Image (cartoon, grey):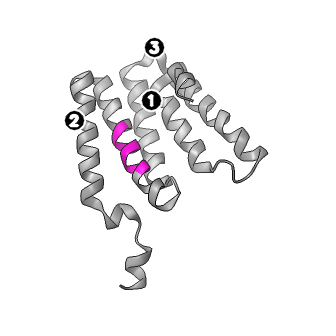
């Protein structure tokens, strides 16, 4: 195996597994919430979490290349689809990230910055319900 192959990200090494997990997550989200804005947000969140969980289990990292675009899509969708709750989505996203940033600063190694960014995604997707999730 070449060094380029061993350095490839898990997402590139196992695209079929990740795509299958995403497809199942999309199907479950749309089955639960229907083909509406809530279903779209849930589908993006669940498919992202499925891929992030697989990568994190294998490499112990939460890749920016996955979490950051998903966070932008989810937060943008929430604001566009539910503009009256835009403040909630933004505050919950930043609040959840801040909540997870504190232990990362207080005790380095206890929590990584990927966890902080994942908290942002969860806050953007769940709004105030992120409190229960955290």
User: Which quadrant would residue 132 be assigned to in this image?
Assistant: top right
Callout 1: SS: helix
Q: Position of residue 67 (x, y in %)?
A: 46, 47
With respect to residue 79, does 117 lie above or below? below
Callout 3: SS: helix
Disc 2 to disc 3, C-alpha distance: 28 Å
Mark nearer the N terminus (1 vs 2): 2
Left or right of 119: which side holds 98? right
Q: Position of residue 128 (x, y in %)?
A: 53, 19
User: Which quadrant would residue 35 be assigned to in this image?
Assistant: top left
Q: Which mark is residue 84?
A: 3
Q: Nearer the viewer, residue 68 or 10?
A: 10
User: Which quadrant would residue 48 be assigned to in this image?
Assistant: top left
Disc 1 to disc 2, C-alpha distance: 18 Å
Q: Residue at x 37, y 45 (%)?
A: 50
Q: Nearer the viewer, residue 98 or 132?
A: 132
The span picked out in magenta is 46-53
The residue under label 1 is 125
Q: Position of residue 117 (x, y in %)?
A: 56, 43
With respect to residue 5, does 98 lie above or below? above
The residue under label 2 is 27
> Quick one: which residue is furthest to the right in this view?
106
> Quick one: which residue is furthest to the front in this view?
57
Whether residue 52 appears in magenta in the rendering, the answer is yes
Quarter of the image where the N terminus is located: bottom left
Contact (Cβ within 8 Å) of mark 3 with mark 1:
no
Q: Residue at x 30, y 54 (%)?
A: 18
Q: Residue at x 48, y 47 (%)?
A: 68
Q: Nearer the viewer, residue 91 or 99?
A: 99
Q: Please, what is the dominant secondary structure of the magenta stretch?
A: helix
Mark nearer the N terminus (2 vs 3): 2
Image mark count: 3
């Amino acid at each position: 195996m070449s060094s380029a192959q061993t350095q490839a990200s898990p997402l590139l090494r196992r695209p079929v597994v990740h795509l299958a997990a995403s497809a199942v997550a999309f199907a479950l989200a749309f089955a639960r919430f229907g083909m509406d804005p809530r279903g779209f947000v849930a589908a993006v969140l669940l498919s992202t979490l499925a891929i992030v969980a697989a990568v994190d289990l294998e490499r112990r990292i939460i890749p920016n290349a996955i979490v950051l675009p998903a966070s932008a899509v989810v937060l943008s969708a929430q604001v566009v689809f539910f503009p009256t709750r835009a403040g909630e989505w933004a505050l919950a996203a930043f609040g959840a990230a801040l909540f997870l940033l504190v232990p990362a600063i207080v005790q380095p190694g206890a929590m990584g910055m990927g966890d902080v960014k994942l908290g942002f995604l969860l806050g953007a997707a769940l709004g105030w319900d992120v409190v229960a999730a955290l």
